[in-house]
Amino acid sequence: MPLDARELGRRLRERDRSAAPAVLNLIEDRSAAARGRAAALLAELSPAALGGEAPAHLVGITGPPGAGKSSLLSALVPTWRGAGRTVAVLAVDPSSKRSGGSLLGDRVRIEHDPKDDGILIRSTATGGRLGGLAAPTREAAHALAAAFDVVVVETVGVGQSETDVEEVCDTVAVVVQPGSGDTLQFLKAGIMEVPDVLVVTKADLGDVAERARRDLAQALTSLGAGSVPVVAASSVAPVSGIEELAAALDAHRDRIDVPATRLRARRLMALGDFVAEHGEVALRALGGRREAERFLCTLDPGLQAPALVSALRERASRERAPTS
Amino acid sequence: MGASKAGLGQTEKPPQGESRARLPERDRPWVMRTYAGHSTAKDSNALYRSNLEKGQTGLSVAFDLPTQTGYDPDHELSRGEVGKVGVSIAHKADMHALFDGIPLDAMNTSMTINATAAWLLALYMTVAEENGVERGSLQGTTQNDIIKEFLSRGTYAFPPEPSMRLIADTIAFTVDEVPKWNPVNICSYHLQEAGATPVQEIAYALSTAQAVLDGVRPRVPPEHFPRVFGRISFFVNAGIRFIEEHAKLRAMSALWEEFGRERYGVEDPKFLRMRYGVQVNSLGLTEAQPENNVIRIVLEALAVTMGRDARARALQLPAWNEALGLPRAWDQQWSLRIQQILAHETDLLEYADIFEGSHVMDALVEELTEGARAEMAAVADRGGAVAAVPYMKTQLVESHRARVGAVERGELKVVGKNVFTSAEPSPLQEGEDGGILTVDPDVEQGQIAAVQRWRSERDQAAVDAALGELAAAAADESSNVMPATLAAARAGATTGEWGATLRAVFGEYRAPTGVADAAPAPEDDALEELRDRVERVSEAIGRRIKILVGKPGLDGHSNGAEQIAIRARDAGMDVVYEGIRLTPVRIAATAVQEGVHVVGLSILSGSHRELIPDVLEELRAAGADVPVVVGGIIPRPDAEAMLAAGVSRVYTPKDFEVSRIMGDIVDLVAEHNGVGAHAA
Ligand SMILES: Nc1nc2c(ncn2[C@@H]2O[C@H](COP(=O)(O)OP(=O)(O)OP(=O)(O)O)[C@@H](O)[C@H]2O)c(=O)[nH]1
Ligand SMILES: [Mg+2]
C-alpha cells in the first residue's frame, strides 16, 4: 500500500527526518499517479503550510568536474554537524546520453558517519536535462528544507550551466581548483554570473592555490564585486579554510532577503519547467520570457511550482486559442 | 621443414664446457614457496613447518585483511575477516608464535604486506632480535607496493603521499640496517588480475618503480643509491598465453636495465639486473571443471622458468581450487610438486637461454617494449604514477571490461567455461569438505579475546610513550618512522594501534574507483535489448531502476564489483557505487537514503558467512524492503544458506555472462515491485 502522501509531508514538516527517503522516492516518481500524490505532499510543505519560508539554508556547491566539491563537503558536513545543524546533501551527476544510466560517484567521496541520522545524502542523475537540475532535484531541495538545517545541492557546472543551482539555492559557492584558468576567463568575459562565494580548493598544494586565490579576487574587484569572499580551503590533511568558508556562507545568508529570493526562485523554476515541458513555442505564446516573468509576479506568492506551471499553461493556451 | 636431429632421442653429450647449448653445471632452482597462512599464528606455524618438510625452500606469509589494513581483531571492520585470507598478527607475541622453531637467519621469508609493511617488518625484526638473530642476516621481502593497492587490491590505509613516504622510509632504513632484505616488491601481478594487458603490466609496474625510487632518492646518501636500485624487486604475474608472457618478462628486464642506466646512472650490472618473483595467474582459474586448472598452472609456470635470461628468482603457484574457496594443505602440496618436477625432473635447468637468437621472440619483445614505452610516457605526462592513479585505474577497468566481454561472447576461449562445457562430475570435489578449506569460525572470537588480554597485561605506559614517539616521527616529514615503529613493536603495541596512530597523523583515504570515467560499452544487440527492458521496468515503477553496488568488509578486490557497476550503468540503471570497506550499517543506511531498488554485494575473502547475514539484519532494522544479490567466491552450501536467509540471488565465478546477471536483476526488480510480466 502506498504511503499516504499528505502524511509524509506532515511528518517532514514536523522535522521527522526519517520520512525524508520516502518523500524523495515519491518526488522522483514520474508516473502520473505519483505526480498527483507528490503535489499533495508538496502542498504540505508550502510556505503557507509552514507558516513562512522553510528555515533551512539552501547552499549550492558547483564547479568543474574534479574540482574537489565532494571532498569539500566531507570537511564541511562535520563542521555543520559540530555546530548542531542537520545536513542533507543532494548530489547530482550527469546521466549517460546513450544509455540513460548513470554512475553516481559523489556519495563515496563524502566521508560521513552512517549512524548519524542528522545527515542524509541522496544521489541523483540529471536525467538528460542539459546542464542543470532535474525537476525532482529542485522539488527535493525545497522539501528537505522543511526538515534539515542545511540543504546542499552539489552539481557539476562550468560557465553558464550553474544558473539552475542559483535559482534553487539561497547561497551559491563556485568551487575551482588551482591552476585551471577557465573560471577566471568565464568571470572576466561575463559568461558566468558572479557567485556568492568563491572557493579555491586544494590549498594544501601551496603557492599555486594562493596565486589562484589572488587572481580570482583581483578579477572580482575589477568587475566591481570586490566584496565577494574568495576562500582558499584544503579538504585533505592539513585541513584548512573550512571554518572560514562556513562563516562566509552564513554571512551571505544573513545579508539576503530569504523570502524574496525563494519566491523568485520558485517562479523561475516554474518557468524553466514550463519551457522544458512545452518548448520555446509555448514561451512565445506567452509573449516571451520577460513577459512570462511579469505574469508570474502577478500570481499569489504562496503558490508552489506545480501550480505556477499550471497557471502558465492555462495562460499560454488562452493566448494561443484566438490565433488557431 | 628440417627435422631436428635432437628429436626425441638422447643426443651424444659433447665434452664438458664446450657446448653452446648446455651449461657446465645445472642451474640452482629458484626459491620455491607457497602463499600460505590462515587462522592463528600457531596454526600457520604448523603449516609452514610441514611445507618446509615437503621441500619448500622459502616461506610466503599470507596475512589476514585486518593485519594488512592496520586493524586489530576487535575492530568493527575486522568482523568476519580475522584469520580468513591469511594469518592474524596483532603484536610481537603473534609473530614469535608464527616463526616458532624456524631459524630466521636461515630462512627466506616473503611477506605479502603493503600499507602496514613497516610495522610487520618491525615485528619480524623484533622477533629476530629477541631470539638473538643478527638483523644483517635477515633475508626476505616485504611487498610494500601501495600503488597497486590503490589500483587493484585495495588494502591501503593512508593517502598516497604519506604511503609513499612510508615506503621510502623502509627502503632508506633497510638498505643499511638489513641489507639482504628486499624492502619493496613492485607488483605487476595484481595489475593483470585487474585486467592489465602485458603492455600495461610492464608500463605501470615500471612507472611505480620510478615513483618509489624518486621518493627514496632524497632520503639516502647519493653513493648508496645504486644499491637502493639493486634492492628493488618485482612481483609478476604469468597468464596462460605463455609465450607472450615470457616475452613480457624479457621486455621488462631490458627496460629496467635501460632505466637504471639512463635515468639513475647505475652502472654495476649486479644492480641493474631485474630480480623478480612470480605467482602465476589466479584470474584465469575456473570454477567449472576445476581439475583443468592444474594444466593451466603448469603452463604458466613454464612461462617464467623456461628462458634462462628472464627466469624467476622465486615462484609460488596457486592451487587448482582457488576459484572455489580456500585451498587445503594437500592442494598446496600438489602445486609445490609441480615446481619440484619442473626443477628436478625436467632438463629445464641444464641449458643456456633457449630463446637466444629467436627472431620471433625478439620481435615479440620489441613489440611489447615499444608499447610499454608509449604507455609509460602517458603516465609520465600525467605527473607520474602517484598522480596518474586515476588514469591507470580507468585504463585497467577498460581493459578488464574488454576481457570480460570477450569471454562472454566466446571470443576468448576458456575450456570448460565457455567451450567444451559438457563434462563428468569432478571427483576432486566429492569429499566431505567439498574440496576446500573452511576456517574455524571460532578463530575470530579467540583472537579478539587474545588481543584484549594482551593489551591488559602489557606495560601500558611504555606503549603510550612509544606511540607518542611514533606520532611525532610521522608528523615530521624529515624523520624516518622505522626506529619509532621498532620501538613500538618492542614495547608491545598492536597492529591496530600502529595503524590508528598513523591514521590520526596522515588521514584516511578512499582510492578512485575508475568506474565513473569508464567509457560507455560498445553497442550491441544484447545491450540494446537489455536497455529496453530497463526502460520498460523503470517506466512501470515510476523511477529509473537504481542499484547500490558495494563491497562489505575489508576485501579490496573490487574488479568484479566495478564491472557490475559499469554494466548496470550501460544498461541504463542509476548506479550508486560505494566501493570497498563498507560496514553493514553503512550499506543499509545508503540503501535507505538513496532509495535503491536492489542491492548488489561482492565478497571474495570468505567473510560472506558473517557479513551477508549482518547486512540483511541491518537492512531489516533500517526498514528497507529491498532485494539483495551477492557475487563472489562462495561455496555451494554457503550459497544455499544465504538464499534461505533471504538473499535473492547468488552468483559465483561460473556466472561469467554479465548481461545475463543484469537481465536477472531487472526481472528481480520488476517482480519485487509488482510489475512482473508485462514490463520485463
Ligand atoms: N590535494 C588535495 N586534493 C584534493 C582536495 N580536495 C579534493 N582533492 C582530490 O581531487 C579529486 C577530486 O575530488 P572530488 O571531491 O571528487 O571532486 P568533485 O568536484 O566532487 O568531483 P566530481 O563530483 O566528479 O565533479 C580527488 O582525487 C580528491 O582526492 C584537496 O583539498 N587537496
Ligand atoms: Mg563530486
Image (cartoon, coloured by chain):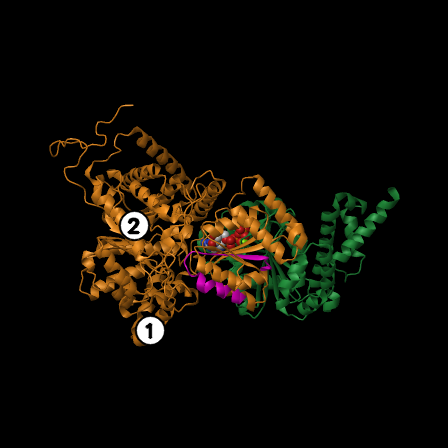
Chain colours: A green, B orange
> For the residue carrying disc 2, how many other residues have a C-alpha within 10 Å: few (<14), some (14-19), or many (20+)?
many
Viewer-closest of B629 and B17:
B629
Please report the residue visible at 76 percent of the width from the left and 54 percent of the height from the top. Answer: A309
Quadrant position of residue B483? bottom left
In the image, residue B362 lies at what x, y percent? 31, 31
Give the residue type that dot 2 points to: Ser
Q: Residue furthest front?
A: B424
On the picture, is B389 further left or further right than B532?
A: left
Q: Is residue B424 above or below residue B643?
A: above
- For residue B335, the mark is 2
On the picture, is A276 further left or further right than B42?
A: right
Which chain is mark 2 on? Answer: B
On the picture, is B515 further left or further right than B457?
A: right
- For residue B284, the mark is none
Which numbered disc flags the more N-terminal residue, 1 or 2? 2
Viewer-closest of A23 and B540:
B540
> For the residue carrying disc 1, how many other residues have a C-alpha within 10 Å: few (<14), some (14-19), or many (20+)?
some
Secondary structure state at the residue bearing disc 2:
helix
- Residue extent of the magenta highlight: B594-618
> Quick check: is B349 in the magenta stretch?
no
In the image, residue B75 lies at what x, y percent? 41, 68
Question: Which residue in the structure is indicated by mark 1?
Answer: B455
Marks 1, 2: nearer the viewer: 2
Give the residue type that dot 1 points to: Arg
> Quick check: is B601 in the magenta stretch?
yes
Q: Quadrant of the N terminus of chain A?
A: bottom right
In the image, residue A300 lies at what x, y percent? 80, 60
